[in-house]
């Protein structure tokens, strides 16, 4: 099979991402037993905790920063930042979970898909593997990786 400019491993990961997105889109569409909100991020682009937390919080909250508004981060409570420390990221996940749980759909499941997980710095890998335990919310982390 011709992988073009991709290496064999890159092609496999590239092919997995649309499949994972399609499955999560299908599972998150109503009706379902719970509301599913998900974020897909790439570990290659997340070489610091700050670069990891912002896109995840924004995607889970379905927030798109607008340039005209100063590209503000999502904040359930005005002025709160979720990207300075891992503890703040944890509080951000709790805030997103509470925000999504308001209204009819109280049962919310958060899913974080981490592509190229082998590129994560070790401190983040350890923290992410224990994230659901620390947050005590319905949270699933999917690590997508490829080794040669």
Image (spheres, rainbow, N blue to C red):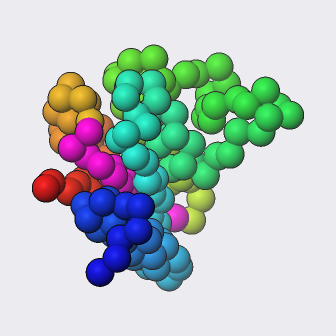
Residue under the point 68% across and 45% down:
64
Tell me: 112 left or right of 39.
left
Point 62% across, 35% down: residue:
74
Q: Residue furthest right?
A: 68
Q: Position of residue 2 (x, y in %)?
A: 34, 76
Residue situated furthest left in the rendering: 148
Q: Residue at x 82, y 31 (%)?
A: 69
Q: Residue at x 43, y 48 (%)?
A: 41
Residue interval drawn in magenta: 105-119
In x, y percent, where is residue 58?
Answer: 56, 42
Magenta stretch: includes residue 108: yes
Left or right, 104 with reference to 78: left
Return the x and y of residue 146 as percentages of the image width and height: 20, 57
Residue 3, quarter of the rendered image: bottom left
Whether 76 is drawn above or below 143: the answer is: above
Which image quadrant for residue 38? bottom left
């Amino acid at each position: 099979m011709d992988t073009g400019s991709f290496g064999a491993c890159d092609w496999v990961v590239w092919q997995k991402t649309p499949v994972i997105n399609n499955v999560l889109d299908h599972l998150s569409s109503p009706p379902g037993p719970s509301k599913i909100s998900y974020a897909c991020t790439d570990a290659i682009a997340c070489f610091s905790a700050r670069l990891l937390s912002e896109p995840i919080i924004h995607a889970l909250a379905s927030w798109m920063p607008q340039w005209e508004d100063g590209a503000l981060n999502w904040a359930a409570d005005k002025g709160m930042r979720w990207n300075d420390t891992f503890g703040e990221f944890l509080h951000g996940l709790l805030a997103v979970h509470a925000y999504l749980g308001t209204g009819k759909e109280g049962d919310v499941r958060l899913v974080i898909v981490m592509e190229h997980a082998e590129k994560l710095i070790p401190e983040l890998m350890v923290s992410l593997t224990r994230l659901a335990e620390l947050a005590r919310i319905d949270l699933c982390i999917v690590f997508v990786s490829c080794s040669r």
